[in-house]
Amino acid sequence: MSEQGTPRHVAIIMDGNGRWAQQRGRPRLLGHRAGGKRLRQVVEACPGLGVEYLTVFAFSTENWKRTQIEVAGLMKLFRQHLESEAKGLEEAGVCVRFIGDRVRLEPVLQRLMAELEARTAHNTRLNLTIAINYGGRDEVARATKRLARDVAAGKLSPEEITDETLPRYLDTHVLPDPDLVIRTSGEARISNFLLWQSAYSEYEFVDTLWPDFTPDTFAEILGRFGSRSRRFGAA
Ligand code: IPE
Ligand code: IPE
Ligand code: MG
């Protein structure tokens, strides 16, 4: 990606739902609900803004540490969104993929995820990747396990393991690396998101809480990206 371009792949850590609700004296789940609505708007804005790949962090491998009520509420919300948004996403030309370890998710959720992926696989207008039960370290560990199996089976020699072969085992193997990673809510950390893939990504940490993140805010950030100079280690 050269200067002044639009980032082809944008990844977003959608943070701040809880605080958004708290500020209104409402339960955290209300913030997650508002966040879901925002995501829909941001997805719709992507093609017009020139973004080809959007990857969003919806639930981390560490988020199981939250109260049972919040976790159950989030899982229910994911299920509801998958059911209500499937048709619209398919018709809007969005190709949906999920990254993360699905095994721990409820079977009904796993089924809806697989169905949505199959149903939208032919779409090319926008590539939307949703990270659920995703952790960068967990992803690398799972990838390493598969890689080790291939080595044990004689399909790959240890000498063939390079920074090009390893990422083929990651959940993101079909995606380009993110050009820009945005985190909302004012926290300046990556919280285990896309560790390998974001090695050379640009970062934007914005104070806006995710439920307040409008397509206009998004467009403004993308505009700033245009004036950044990426060198990838070169002089
Ligand atoms: C992000 O919002 C959504 C998830 C992690 C599921 P938070 O729920 O982390 O909101 P804050 O950070 O507590 O405000
Ligand atoms: C990161 O946010 C995960 C998601 C946005 C899904 P967290 O709120 O879980 O991260 P920490 O706890 O502030 O690092
Ligand atoms: Mg948070």
Image (cartoon, rainbow, N blue to C red):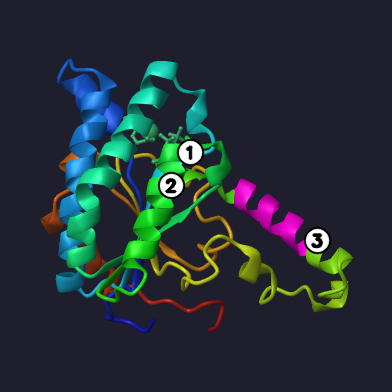
Amino acid type, callout 3: Arg
Rounded to the nearest angstrom, the CA distance separating label 2 from label 3 is: 26 Å
Q: Badge 3 local density, few (<14 within 10 Å), some, or many (20+)?
A: few
Residue in the picture at 18% in, 66% down:
91
Left or right of 62, for residue 130: left
Residue 116 at what x, y percent from top left? 34, 56
Q: Give the CA separation, mark 1 to mark 3.
A: 26 Å
Q: Main secondary structure of the magenta part?
A: helix
Instruction: Find numbered disc 3 in the image and state the secondary structure of the residue it sits on.
Output: helix
Number of dots carrying numbers: 3
Question: At 56% from the left edge and 77% from the top edge, which residue is drawn?
Answer: 233
Disc 2: which residue = 111
Question: CB under 8 Å between callouts 1 and 2?
Answer: yes
Can the viewer see residue 218? no
| Closest to the observer, 83 or 187 | 83
Instruction: Name the mark nearer the viewer: 1 or 3.
Output: 1
Q: Is residue 228 above or below residue 58?
A: below
Q: For residue 216, what is the image quadrant?
A: bottom left
Residue under label 3, please give it: 149
In the image, 205: left or right of 146? Answer: left
Left or right of residue 146, residue 215 in this image: left
Residue drawn at point x = 26 percent, y = 75 percent = 226
Q: Is residue 235 left or right of residue 165?
A: left
Q: Are marks 1 and 3 in contact (CB under 8 Å)?
A: no
Magenta stretch: includes residue 105: no
Magenta range is: 137-148
Task: Locate residue 140: give its quadrant.
Answer: bottom right
Q: Position of residue 40 (x, y in %)?
A: 19, 51
Mark 1 and mark 2: Cα distance apart in space: 6 Å
Instruction: Provide the secondary structure element on which disc 2 rests.
Output: helix
